[in-house]
Amino acid sequence: MADQTRTPQDGTEESQPLHHPAPDRTSPDGRGLPEIPVTLSTASVYPRRAAYAFSAAAELGYDGVEVMVWSDPATQDARTLRHLATQYGVPVRSVHAPTLLVSQRVWGRAPAPKLRRSVDLALEVGASTVVVHPPFRWQYKYARDFQEQVRELSAETGVTIAVENMYPWRPRKHRGQRDYMAYLPGWDPTEHGYDAVTLDLSHAACAGQDGLELVKVFGDRLRHVHLADGSGAARDEHLVPGRGRQPCDLVLEELVSRGWRGDVVVEIATRKARSPHERRADLEASLTYARSYLQPEPKEYHPPAPEHRHLPADAW
């Protein structure tokens, strides 16, 4: 695949990607989107920008995009996102609030208004879900009212606000040290009464949890899934599904058997890809994996070996 955007000498990306026609997403029975859509997180193409994610999603046949709000101006602007969605025929189906360490300064430092602004953005672009991390420990005032704010915002707007499972921070160099509990009221949604949760399988791997068991524990509260894999390392890896130790295949099969209704979002790390071809290969393998198991009669699929050295992500 030829690179879809030009890169100036300063390393930034110009937002004039080539146009691709919208893929045909009509199912054989004419109902349109599949029962469980597979969408692409813009984080999956980092350090490429949002326009590249829309272009790749259209070319490969993803059912939509999840927008990770961070320093890329396009991810913060509803008008730009609507234009990209129209240009490529790929809807924005969910928004990830700027609650990462690397996005602490996006839309100011106060976390509660950023959540409200994320919901407003979702409404403006037609997305039905907002993904949010639990507050960091140092955001104790935000944490105090977090669960109630999430519940009230969701009831007021009709947008599903799905709190994501995280993991304890483990020191990499000092064995024997205790894990650092970086989140309030905690990193594990199974211990808290959120109405809607997002299951991130890479985070589950970091926490030493079994993704299939989490599906069963979350039950009807499970509204959104981030599809990626992990080896159980201390750092968040976001591997292509099937390249780690999480039972990603069984999780997807379980969703189908339950008649689950939600989005499965491919959220992998490709920032060490050396070429558009290598990045595309990982995005395509992830989509093929998801589609192979998200059907009544799943087909076994093993992704090919990576063509580039993987680099862990930053707690997406």
Image (cartoon, rainbow, N blue to C red):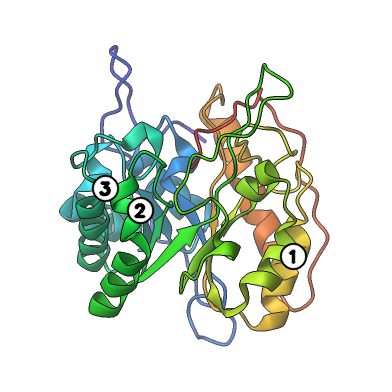
Amino acid beneath label 2: Ala
Name the image quarter holding residue 158: bottom left
Amino acid beneath label 3: Pro
Circle 1 sits on which residue? 213
Q: Nearer the viewer, mark 1 or mark 2?
A: 2
- Image coordinates for residue 145, horizontal then vertical, percent: 31, 61
Circle 2 sits on which residue? 143
Residue at x-position 59% and y-position 45%: 167
Q: Secondary structure at mark 1?
A: helix
Q: Earlier in the sequence, mark 1 or mark 2?
A: 2
- Image coordinates for residue 131, horizontal then vertical, percent: 41, 58
Q: Residues within 10 Å of mark 2 (few under 14, many from 20)?
A: many
- Image coordinates for residue 284, horizontal then vertical, percent: 61, 47
Q: Residues within 10 Å of mark 1 (few under 14, many from 20)?
A: few
Q: In the rendered view, does 314 fall on the left or right side of 75?
A: right
Circle 3 sits on which residue? 111
Q: Looking at the image, can residue 142 be seen?
A: yes
Q: Residues within 10 Å of mark 3 (few under 14, many from 20)?
A: many
Name the image quarter holding residue 175: top right
Query: Gap between marks 2 and 3, in whole Å?
Result: 10 Å
Q: Secondary structure at mark 2?
A: helix
Q: In the rendered view, does 114 fall on the left or right side of 132?
A: left
Q: Looking at the image, can residue 18 be seen?
A: no
Residue at x-position 34% and y-position 46%: 140
Amino acid beneath label 1: Glu
Using the image, determine if residue 1 lies above or below residue 129. above
